[in-house]
Image: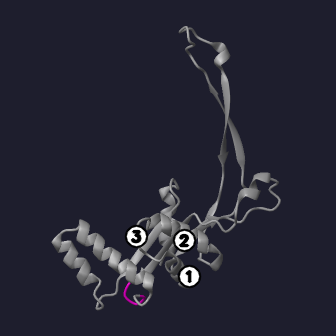
């Protein structure tokens, strides 16, 4: 999946068709330069160096929730046999691009994992997730859905919470490989 990182400049001409006196103004021609960047991504097992990237994505996901994100991040890394992170493919050393210095090989652009809410409930973060689900259902759900969630979160059922988060404005197509690698 790794490949060369190509950059291509695209010239776009912009013409201002009206001047202050309403006539065409040829001197108003501007040339703007836009860059199109080709980047390859790949799914990998979460490792310790992914901690800050995963935590940043979880913070984005649980913005106002009271969940211990550091513990949740450690749990995701601990169970690296489930789920994956999306990272940029290895950078070619001989590509010759100076702009590759800005790329951190540990940047995480997406994360998917499944947290077992039954077996892992002794973790503080999992207990907080369970409480968050109950609170949100009580606040936004019907009586029937509230009863269903409470029954589902009882100790007799095995329940998993799918965590799937990516950077804002990242294409939705990236979710497919993340979900395929989650199981």
Residue of label 1 = 80
On the image, numbered disc 3 is attached to which residue? Answer: 65
Residue 116 seen in this snapshot: no
Residue 111 vs 25, above or below: the answer is below
Eye-nearest disc, 1 or 3:
3
Q: Main secondary structure of the magenta part?
A: loop
Q: Secondary structure at mark 1?
A: loop
Task: Tell me the residue at 43%/88% (across/down).
Answer: 120
Q: Which residue occupies 57% across, 63% down? A: 109
Q: Give the Cα distance between marks 2 and 3.
A: 14 Å
Part of the protein shown in magenta:
116-120
Residue 41, position in %: x, y? 62, 62
Residue 105: name its quadrant: bottom right
Give SS at disc 2: helix
Q: Residues within 10 Å of mark 1 (few under 14, many from 20)?
A: some
Q: Which mark is residue 55?
A: 2
């Amino acid at each position: 999946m790794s490949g060369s990182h190509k950059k291509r400049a695209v010239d776009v001409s912009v013409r201002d068709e009206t001047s202050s006196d309403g006539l065409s103004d040829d001197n108003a021609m501007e040339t703007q330069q836009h860059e199109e960047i080709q980047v390859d991504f790949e799914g990998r097992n979460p490792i310790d160096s992914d901690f800050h990237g995963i935590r940043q994505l979880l913070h984005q996901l649980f913005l106002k929730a009271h969940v211990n994100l550091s513990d949740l991040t450690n749990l995701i890394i601990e169970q690296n046999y489930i789920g994956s992170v999306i990272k940029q493919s290895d950078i070619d050393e001989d590509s010759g691009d100076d702009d590759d210095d800005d790329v951190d090989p540990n940047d995480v652009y997406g994360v998917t994992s499944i947290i077992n809410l039954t077996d892992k409930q002794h973790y503080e973060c999992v207990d907080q997730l369970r409480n968050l689900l109950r609170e949100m259902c009580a606040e936004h759900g019907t009586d029937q859905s509230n009863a269903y969630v409470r029954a589902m979160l009882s100790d007799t059922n095995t329940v998993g919470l799918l965590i799937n988060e990516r950077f804002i404005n990242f294409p939705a197509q990236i979710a497919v490989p993340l979900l395929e690698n989650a199981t």
